[in-house]
Image (cartoon, rainbow, N blue to C red):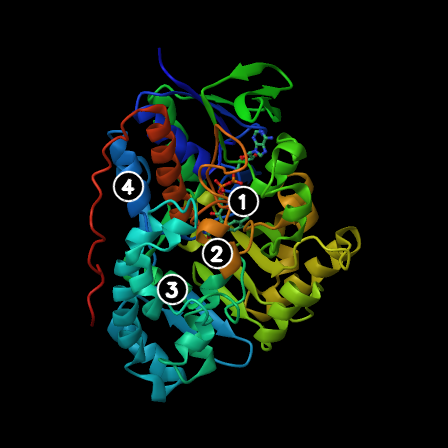
């Protein structure tokens, strides 16, 4: 008889795991609390406008390509991926801008325009990180189930290159003298919800991945990727049950045996939790069964930042790039406000996606969408969003006007705001920390909640809350790691994934 696995949550992690498990012959049921699939990678649609709820940068498609290959299909047959060039514009509060392009020649000219002394450093950065990435990749693809995995020879050999205790910013001083250029190659640590002044230097591979393998816009938005994943999963026989929140994981002793929803009781050989780790554990697994991740211990962990979001459907189309990132004039203070003081900055950094310049399908003719994201503190008693919501909206609209989105207030035809309080209560994200547990050294690898969850039997984790961490490519990697562990434990073979070596750069130097 087929083994049966329950997956709690139809986010990208849960869907990727469902594809891999079903490809191996497992009967899979996905239970999703919301009426839609995709989790944070879903879309908001209203009045003819379509926005991504969360992710807008689709990076490093290779992992998902391999997962689709295991299911007998190709990612590019299911979703149209548009490579962006320039991949984004950076605007520095202290002056200057950069149109960041993967074309080495053009990028060097951009660098020369703000810091002639740094010409040549981009190439050196790419070369150094190419080696770092190629050597570290096999380590990322492993599970970390204990200290013994950390002491493996491959990882130990890499330590001098990874410089685990050095921050990205310090590491980048080796290449770039101008602090704005260092920011250009380290602001990506914000994808993990972390300050580059604290984030381990290993994560310089994030900006490298953008330049080396591209920043993509999936036509229709990133939610088209999760929609395609759900289609592929259903073709393999996965049952996705929407509007069905899991209220409790059922146990016999320490062994998980199923789950109870408001509608039904399900029995299974194993469970995969894709729901936000800290929220799911504290709600679905009795505290008494947990040892390493009790409610009290979870409360003491470090959590990522949150985000204040504005989704605007506007008249007209602004002649600005697809992605623009505005870096506060005092970036260090902005980050300290977010991570240490837990207060709102008066001069915040923020990001605007003006996706209709690439993809007019997202808005009615003559109109366009603007997605505005400002990183802010996760839920904290210092900030009461019922009071701050309106003030922050005004502040960001003012910043948008300054940034070239002229007459914005008069052009708004549709508007939706999501605050950290909404992420917490409506999207069930612990403290509204949109990027999960933070990625500090003491919460990485075997110190992160493990893919085969260590506190009880028969429970596995997938998604941003487990190893390797947050962000779509690594979430897909977590699905591969977790599915392999689970299939091994069930005595089943892992489907072939045709692992391909990372491709070479596709953009030629001009
Ligand atoms: C604003 C924002 C911007 C981001 N930008 C990027 C980006 O540009 N690029 C990138 O790579 N990453 C980005 N991320 C990070 C990350 O890739 C996404 O958040 C991703 O969707 C996380 O996937 P996941 O599988 O961990 O979980 P989720 O997407 O959170 O999915 C978990 C699912 O579990 C469901 N669930 C929860 N509780 C229950 C329950 N009790 N019963 C049943 N179901 C339940 C939820 O409803 C949800 O559908 C961004 C995140 C946010 C929030």
* Quadrant housing residue 69: top left
Q: Nearer the viewer, mark 3 or mark 2?
A: 3
Q: Nearer the viewer, mark 1 or mark 3?
A: 3
N-terminal label among 3 and 2? 3
- Residue 65's label in the rendered image is 4
Direction from residue 361 to residue 377 in the image, left or right: right
- Can see residue 10? yes
Q: Nearer the viewer, mark 1 or mark 4?
A: 4
Outermost residue, bottom direction?
117
Circles 3 and 2 in contact, beta carbons < 8 Å: no
- Residue 354's label in the rendered image is 2
Q: How far apart, in angstroms, are the residues tagged by discs 4 and 3?
A: 21 Å
Q: How far apart, in angstroms, are the residues tagged by discs 2 and 1?
A: 14 Å
Q: Who is closer to the viewer here, 147 or 348?
A: 147
Q: Nearer the viewer, mark 2 or mark 1?
A: 1
Residue receiving disc 3: 207
> Which quarter shows the N terminus?
top left
Q: Position of residue 91 (x, y in %)?
A: 49, 72
State the SS at label 4. Answer: helix
Q: How far apart, in angstroms, are the residues tagged by discs 3 and 2?
A: 21 Å
């Amino acid at each position: 008889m087929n083994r049966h696995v329950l997956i709690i949550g139809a986010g990208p992690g849960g869907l990727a795991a469902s594809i891999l498990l079903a490809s191996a012959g497992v009967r899979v049921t996905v239970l999703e609390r919301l009426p839609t699939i995709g989790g944070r990678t879903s879309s908001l649609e209203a009045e003819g406008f379509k926005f991504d709820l969360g992710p807008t940068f689709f990076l490093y498609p290779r992992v998902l390509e391999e997962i689709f290959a295991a299911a007998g299909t190709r990612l590019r047959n299911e979703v149209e991926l548009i490579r962006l060039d320039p991949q984004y514009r950076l605007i520095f509060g202290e002056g200057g801008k950069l149109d960041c392009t993967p074309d080495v020649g053009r990028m060097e000219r951009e660098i020369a325009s703000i810091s002639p002394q740094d010409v040549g450093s981009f190439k050196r950065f790419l070369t150094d990180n190419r080696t770092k990435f190629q050597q570290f990749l096999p380590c990322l693809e492993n599970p970390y189930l204990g200290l013994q995995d950390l002491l493996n020879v491959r990882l130990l050999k890499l330590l001098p290159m990874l410089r685990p205790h050095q921050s990205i910013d310090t590491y980048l001083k080796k290449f770039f003298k101008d602090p704005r250029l260092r920011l250009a190659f380290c602001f990506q640590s914000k994808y993990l919800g972390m300050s580059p002044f604290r984030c381990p230097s290993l994560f310089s591979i994030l900006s490298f991945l953008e330049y080396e393998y591209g920043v993509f816009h999936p036509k229709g938005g990133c939610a088209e990727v999760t929609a395609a994943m759900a289609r592929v999963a259903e073709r393999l026989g996965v049952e996705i049950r929407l509007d069905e929140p899991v209220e409790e994981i059922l146990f016999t002793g320490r062994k998980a045996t199923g789950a109870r929803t408001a509608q039904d009781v399900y029995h299974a050989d194993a469970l995969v939790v894709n729901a936000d780790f800290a929220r799911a554990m504290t709600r679905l697994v009795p505290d008494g069964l947990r040892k390493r991740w009790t409610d009290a211990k979870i409360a003491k962990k470090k959590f990522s930042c949150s985000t204040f979001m504005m989704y605007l459907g506007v008249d007209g189309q602004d002649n600005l790039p697809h992605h623009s990132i505005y870096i506060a004039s005092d970036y260090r203070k902005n980050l300290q406000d977010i991570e240490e003081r837990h207060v709102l900055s008066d001069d915040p950094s923020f990001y605007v996606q003006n996706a209709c310049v690439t993809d007019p399908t997202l808005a009615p003719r003559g109109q366009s969408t603007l997605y505005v994201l400002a990183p802010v503190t996760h839920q904290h008693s210092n900030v009461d969003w019922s009071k701050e919501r309106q003030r922050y909206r005004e502040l960001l609209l003012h910043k948008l006007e300054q940034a070239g989105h002229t007459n914005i207030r008069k052009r708004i035809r549709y508007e939706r705001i999501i605050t950290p309080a909404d992420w917490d209560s409506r999207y069930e994200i612990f403290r509204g920390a949109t990027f999960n547990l933070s990625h500090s050294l003491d919460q990485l690898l075997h110190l992160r909640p493990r893919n085969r969850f260590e506190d009880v039997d028969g429970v596995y984790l997938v998604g941003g809350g487990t190893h390797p961490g947050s962000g779509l490519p690594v979430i897909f990697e977590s699905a591969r790691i977790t599915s392999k562990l689970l299939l091994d434990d069930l005595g089943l073979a892992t489907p072939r994934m045709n692992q391909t070596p990372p491709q070479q750069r596709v953009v030629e130097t001009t």
